[in-house]
Image: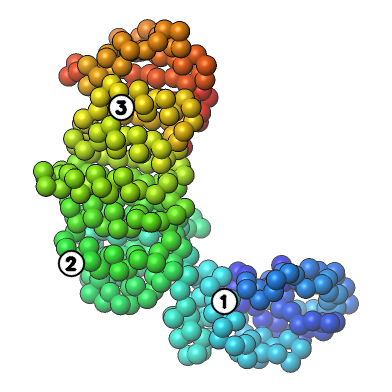
C-alpha cells in the first residue's frame, strides 16, 4: 500500500521518487530496487487514480510510528505542511491507536484530532456501573481481540458536549444500551448518538424513556442490519405511541427481534414481516388467524421476511389450519420426544410452518422459506 490508510509513516532517510511524491506504507525494500506501484488517491482528492509511477528506493530504511516531524518529509514536502482539510481526511481513516499517536505528536495535531469526527468502533455500550466497579469510572476505550470497544457510563453524561463532540459522525457496528434511564438521560443520549452511524441496535431495558430513545435512534435511519428491543411493560396510555413507533421502523436488512406484551396486532405483524428479512416476536400478542395467514403469504411469496417466529394462542393456529386449502398445503403430524409438532408445507414454494403448543394454550409458530438459513 502507498497512501497512509492505517497510520502515520516516517522514514529514517529520504526517498527518491520519480514523477510524484508519495509516502510508503510500513515495510522494507532493498537498496537500488525499483518497483512499479499504483497510487490510490486519498478520499475526495481525485476523480480517478493517478498514473502508474516508478519508485526508486535510494537507501535501506524502515517505517513505523516513531520519529520527528522532519522524518515525514518526502521530496521537500513535510506532513506538517499539509492543509488542515487534507489532514482531517487522513485522520478520519485512522484507527483509534493511530489517532492517539498522532495527537501526541504536537499541540496542533492533538487539537485537530480531537475536533475530527468519524471515529470507528466495533461496539459502543451505555449502561450502569455494576457491583464493585469504580463509581467514578469514566469514558473508557478498550481494545481486545482486535475490537475497538467504547464504554459510556452515566457519569460521562455530565459533560454531554464533550461526549457528543467525541461521537460526532462515529461509525460503529453495534450500539448496545442497557439499564433503566430517566427523562434527562434520554435527552442527553439522543444528543450523544444523534450522528452515530450504527448497523445493529440492542436496547435491553424496558422503561418508557428507553423505548422513546430507541424510537428516536431508528427513525429515518438507513442501513440497519439488526434490531433488538423490549416493549413489555407498557402502560395503557403508551400502547398507541409504541405502535406508531413500530410502524415507522425503517427496513432491517437481517433480523428484527421485539419483546412485547399485548402490543403486536395484525397490522404491526404485517409491517414487521415486510420490513425485515427475519422477524422474531416474543411475548403475548393480539393476533388473529387472518393476520397469521397474511404473514405466511408474505413469507412464501418472499414479500419481505424469509423467516418469522411468533407466539399465538392455540385457538388462533387451529383456526388458521381449518381455513387452509388442502390443494395448496400439506399438513404433517410429528412428535419431538413427547411434544406434538406439526409441519404445514406450502406445496408450490416449499415454505413451511412448524408449531408446537404448551399446556397453557400458547403455541410457538415458525414460518420459513425452504432451506433458508437463519441469521438470528
- Image coords of residue 323 (percent x, y): 33, 12
- Image coords of residue 17 (percent x, y): 82, 82
Q: Residues within 10 Å of mark 2 (few under 14, many from 20)?
A: few
Cα–Cα gap, marks 2 and 3: 39 Å
Vertical position of residue 263 compared to residue 78: above or below: above
Q: Nearer the viewer, mark 3 or mark 1?
A: 3
310 vs 145, nearest the viewer: 310
- Image coords of residue 110 (percent x, y): 47, 85
Residue at the farthest left position? 236
Q: Nearer the viewer, mark 2 or mark 3?
A: 3
166 vs 133, nearest the viewer: 166
Which residue is label 2 attached to? 184
Give the secondary structure at mark 1: helix
272 vs 64, nearest the viewer: 272
Cα–Cα gap, marks 3 and 1: 51 Å
Which residue is label 1 attached to? 89
Q: What's the residue at 78%, 73% (across, down)?
A: 50
Which residue is label 3 attached to? 291
Amino acid at each position: 500500500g502507498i497512501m497512509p490508510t492505517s497510520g502515520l509513516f516516517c522514514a529514517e532517510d529520504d526517498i527518491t521518487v520519480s514523477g510524484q511524491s508519495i509516502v510508503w506504507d510500513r515495510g522494507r525494500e532493498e537498496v537500488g530496487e525499483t518497483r512499479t506501484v499504483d497510487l490510490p488517491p486519498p478520499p475526495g482528492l481525485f476523480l480517478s487514480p493517478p498514473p502508474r509511477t516508478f519508485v526508486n528506493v535510494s537507501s535501506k530504511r524502515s517505517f513505523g510510528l516513531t520519529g520527528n516531524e522532519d522524518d515525514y518529509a518526502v521530496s521537500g514536502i513535510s506532513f506538517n505542511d499539509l492543509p488542515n482539510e487534507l489532514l482531517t481526511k487522513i485522520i478520519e481513516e485512522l484507527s483509534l491507536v493511530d489517532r492517539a499517536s498522532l495527537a501526541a505528536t504536537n499541540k496542533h495535531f492533538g487539537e485537530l484530532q480531537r475536533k475530527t469526527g468519524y471515529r470507528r468502533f466495533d461496539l459502543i455500550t451505555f449502561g450502569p456501573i455494576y457491583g464493585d466497579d469504580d463509581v467514578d469510572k469514566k469514558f473508557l476505550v478498550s481494545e481486545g481481540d482486535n475490537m475497538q470497544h467504547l464504554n459510556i457510563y452515566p457519569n460521562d453524561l455530565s459533560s454531554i458536549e464533550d461526549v457528543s463532540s467525541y461521537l460526532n459522525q462515529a461509525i460503529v457496528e453495534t450500539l448496545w444500551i442497557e439499564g433503566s434511564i430517566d427523562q434527562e438521560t434520554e435527552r442527553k443520549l439522543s444528543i450523544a448518538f444523534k450522528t452515530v452511524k450504527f448497523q445493529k441496535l440492542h436496547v435491553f431495558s424496558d422503561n418508557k424513556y428507553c423505548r422513546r430513545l430507541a424510537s428516536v435512534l431508528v427513525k429515518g435511519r438507513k442501513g440497519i442490519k439488526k434490531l433488538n428491543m423490549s416493549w413489555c411493560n407498557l402502560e395503557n396510555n403508551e400502547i398507541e405511541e409504541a405502535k406508531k413507533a413500530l410502524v415507522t421502523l425503517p427496513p432491517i436488512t437481517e433480523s428484527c427481534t421485539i419483546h412485547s406484551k399485548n402490543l403486536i396486532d395484525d397490522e404491526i405483524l404485517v409491517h414487521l414481516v415486510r420490513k425485515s428479512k427475519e422477524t422474531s416476536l416474543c411475548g403475548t400478542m393480539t393476533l388473529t388467524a387472518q393476520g397469521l395467514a397474511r404473514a405466511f403469504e408474505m413469507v412464501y411469496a418472499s414479500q419481505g421476511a424469509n423467516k418469522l417466529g411468533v407466539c399465538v394462542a392455540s385457538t388462533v393456529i387451529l383456526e388458521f389450519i381449518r381455513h387452509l386449502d388442502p390443494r395448496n398445503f400439506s399438513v404433517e403430524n410429528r412428535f419431538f420426544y413427547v411434544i406434538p409438532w406439526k409441519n404445514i408445507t406450502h406445496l408450490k414454494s416449499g415454505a413451511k410452518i412448524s408449531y408446537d403448543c404448551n399446556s397453557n394454550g400458547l403455541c410457538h409458530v415458525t414460518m420459513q422459506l425452504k432451506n433458508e438459513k437463519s441469521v438470528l
